Every structure is written in C-alpha cells, then in structure tokens.
Image (cartoon, helix red, strand yellow):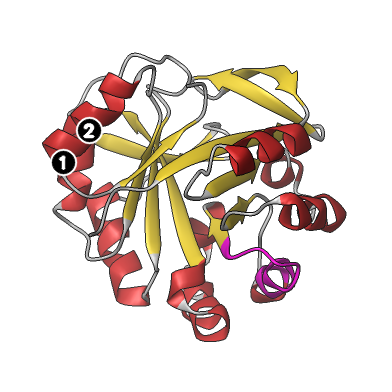
Amino acid sequence: MLRARLIPSLLIHKGGLVKTVNFKNPKYVGDPINAIKIFNEKLADELIIMDIDASVKNVEPDYKLISNFATESRMPLCYGGGIKNLEQAQKIISLGVEKVAISSLALERPEEIPKIVSSIGSQSLVVVIDVKKNKIFSGYSIYSHNGSKKYKTSLDKFIEELMIYGVGEIVINSIDNDGVMEGFDIFLAKHIKSLITTPMTMLGGAGSLNHVSELLDEVGLIGVSCGSL
C-alpha cells in the first residue's frame, strides 16, 4: 500500500546545519553529519539537503561535503544548491546521491532540464519552487536565491512547463511558512496538486504531527518535508 513520504529537510550554511524563519537569519543548530545519523536511526523515508550558500555566492557545489553526506546516509538522498548544468548534476549523482534538486536553473535556463532528464532520469530530477504570497494581488510569486530574487513567471505556467519537460518531482517551499511552525499552506498544496502529474512534496510550516496529518487528510498522497519540526 502506498503511503506518504516523511522527509527531513536540512539547510546547510557555511558547512553547518541551520534553521531559518521566512528564509532569513540562519541560526546554527548543529552538525549535518550527526543529523543524518539520527535520521538513519529514525528510519526517515528520504532526506533533502539544501546548501543555501552555493547559488547566492555563485559557487560550485561542495562535492567533498556531498560525498560525505552520501556515504553516511542510509536513506535516499536529495541534494540541492549551486547546480548550474548537466555536468554538475551528473557528478553529484556519481557520488551516490539519488536525486538532484534545482531551482534557479529551472527558471533561468529551462532548456537544460530535458538534457538532465535524459542523462540521469526524470526520477532523479527534482525542481524546488520557492513561493510567497503576493501582498496586493491574489496568488503567489516565485523566488530564488534564498528569497532575494523575484521572477515574473506565473507559478501555474511554470509548473505546466515543468510537466512538459519531464521533471520527476516538485517540491513547493513556502517562504511565508518557513520556520514559523504554524501549519502548511493547505490552499497552495491543493492547487499545485491539481496541476501536476508527478510526485509532489510540501515544505514549510510543520510544527506538529497534527499539521502533517492535516496536510495529508486535506490534500491526499504527497510527500511531507519538515525542517524545524
């Protein structure tokens, strides 16, 4: 019987594990390797690790650090941060990582997506979409670079394009709910699920197991990713 995946989300800043609120003020909370060991013991379904420095600083992924993560992890691992081309995605997969996550690359050079899909398979390509509610008009806007760069691209249109390109999974990351621990954006989750044909994961807002249950009851079978919780 299929069931929802529970996926811890780890944010890496200056090599350490951090917690953010609304994508701001990263607070050091420990060593990521120790966290991976804990989640191994807790039998987490999967793990998402995102380096929040790489894209902002325009640097390559830290392959040595990624290799250490992959060696330690006994669960499927998804890595995101600083991936700008097919070669980098291939190298990360070669280190033992099951999935690579891209964000700004998908927005700025979507023509790279079919190349990556063709090389590593759609099941290994995840697109993380950072979204924030519009203050004046209804709907949501897409951001990248830790919420510092806003795009004019329509969220619905972007997701439609990702489906055409063959992306294997979508992660919706709510900037408004990040680190607040007051629950997921159920309306957003329902809306996105109605648009896609691929697996979907929601990230941002989990503060209790009740929040997780509410998301699954209201939206259905999706991935649930938790950071602060």
Q: Is 52 a magenta residue?
A: no
Part of the protein shown in magenta: 88-99
Can you identify the residue that label 1 sits on?
219
Of all residues shown, which one is farthest toward the right?
64
95 part of magenta stretch = yes
* Rendered image quadrant of residue 29: top right
Q: Residue at x 29, y 64 (%)?
A: 198
Q: Is residue 221 above or below residue 169?
A: above
User: Quick check: 4 left or right of 220?
Assistant: right
- Name the residue: 64% across, 75% down: 86
Circle 1 — which element? helix
Q: Which residue is mark 2?
A: 215
**What is the distance, in whole Å, between disc 2 and disc 1 at their CAs?**
6 Å
Left or right for 103, reference 14: left
Q: Amino acid at mark 1?
A: Val
Give the image location of residue 118, x and y in percent. 51, 85
Q: What is the x, y in percent for residue 68?
A: 81, 52
For disc 2, the neighbor class at 10 Å (few under 14, some 14 to 19, many from 20) is: many
Residue 134 in view: no
Q: Nearer the viewer, residue 19 or 84?
A: 19
Q: Quadrant of residue 91?
A: bottom right
